[in-house]
Amino acid sequence: MSSTKKPQLHEDWIDPYALRIVKNLQDSGFETYLVGGCVRDLMVGIHPKDFDIATSAHPNQVRKKVPNAYVIGRRFKLVLVKRGDLQFEVATFRRNVSAEELAATPEEETIEGDNYFGTVEEDAKRRDFTANAVFYDPGQNKLIDFCGGIQDIENRVLRMIGDPKERFIEDPIRILRAIRLSHKLHFSIESSMRHAIAETSSELKKSVLPRRREEWLKFLRLDEPHLAFMELFDLHILEQILPGLHSVFMDPSKMEVFEMHLARITQVGINKQDPLELFAGFMFAFMKAQYGEGLWNHEEVYDDAKLAYFIREEMGIFKQEAAVFFKALHLMTSLKKIDNYSRKGERRQMAFVLNEAFGLAMKLSMMDFSLSGAETHYWMQQLEKYTGGKVTPTH
């Protein structure tokens, strides 16, 4: 049973390109809506970063009707529409496939199992949370809801579509998504879903590292990421997939140091769109908690096999990202030695300030207040001298 409702959302925040794509397909006779996180965010007062479009048009029909559209994917075909630096995903309504249908599908075509097209209602019921299953028709200015998502958004409740335990076993990454979204939206997690998280948290060990890495980056982009990691600890999730961080949270004093430093990543200008800087801010907070707030024995830290495992196998941090981070840690010690720097020739001074890790070293120094106001001012002057005030990129 669907419900339609005149929306209370920020229409003026909708990207005009997205509106044109929807109108183009609607004018061609296809049922087309904005859907998912963008609709949810518009309803709760958050500026959407992405605008996803769902339609009755099949991928090749979209490609023919919409300029600069490209069909991508094999298992899950969708259309990518490019508009300058922006891109929009246009997906055809899908439906769940019965075991009988799959059994009747020729073996060479089983890869197409996610390309069984359906109705808008069938598509809604395949989605994860009710809040992500609300469709918006900008032409008619109406919301379409088959799963009770409008009511849940109004009540600020995150609820799973279908049986939560089954859905988490089907895709354990949904556990991380649920916790992250509850913090992003300031929603409460519906009680049966919270119980299911506790029951199925061990399933996360079966998830692949690249997908967990992407979730950690999204966690770190939250306004208060330390609170989200605390909830992961409370729900016994850290011990399953981030045992290194779990050990920090088991010690109240270490946990306090970690949370205090992680809360500063926004204050010091860490670029939240740059995975390298985000992970560097996280790792600095982790290492401050793990190794203490005083001077570290850098050789001992760099040779710590447990740290290397945590970086690579638990967080999914790339080798190059870790290399720049450790280079920034090394530069931090030199930032305290202004006399040594001032005795160098201009070419060596320029090389130091233009080092790829210099800007990151400055930000990490601000995270633990290791530079005085005078020292910070001095280095900002040097930065202005050699770069015009622009911090050199970290990669």
Image (cartoon, helix red, strand yellow):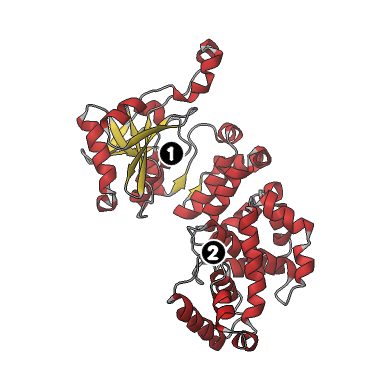
For the C terminus, the quadrant is bottom right
Residue at (52% x, 52% y) in the render: 218
Task: State whether residue 132 is above or below residue 260.
Answer: above
In the image, residue 10 lies at what x, y percent?
28, 52
Q: Which badge, 2 or 1, comes first in the chain's sequence?
A: 1
Instruction: Choose between 319 and 96: the one closer to the eye.
Output: 319
Task: State whether residue 383 is above or below residue 22.
Answer: below
Q: Quadrant of residue 370?
A: bottom right
Q: Residues within 10 Å of mark 2 (few under 14, many from 20)?
A: some
Element at label 2: loop
Q: Residues within 10 Å of mark 1 (few under 14, many from 20)?
A: many
The amino acid on which the numbered mark 2 sits, given as a three-letter code, is Thr
Q: Quadrant of residue 257?
A: bottom right
Instruction: Choose between 270 and 173: the one closer to the eye.
Output: 270
Residue at (22% x, 41% y) in the render: 141
Instruction: Choose between 255 and 340: the one closer to the eye.
Output: 340
Element at label 1: helix
For the N terminus, the quadrant is top left
Task: State whether residue 60 is above or below residue 232.
Answer: above
Whole-angstrom CA distance, mark 2 to mark 1, is 39 Å
Question: Label 1, on which residue?
Answer: 130
Q: Which mark is residue 394?
A: 2
In the image, residue 140 lies at what x, y percent?
21, 38
Residue at (71% x, 61% y) in the render: 248
Task: State whether residue 371 is above or below residue 9.
Answer: below
In the image, residue 337 lies at what x, y percent?
65, 84
In the image, residue 177 lies at what x, y percent?
53, 45
Residue at (36% x, 42% y) in the render: 88
Res 284 visible: yes
The amino acid on which the numbered mark 1 sits, given as a three-letter code, is Thr
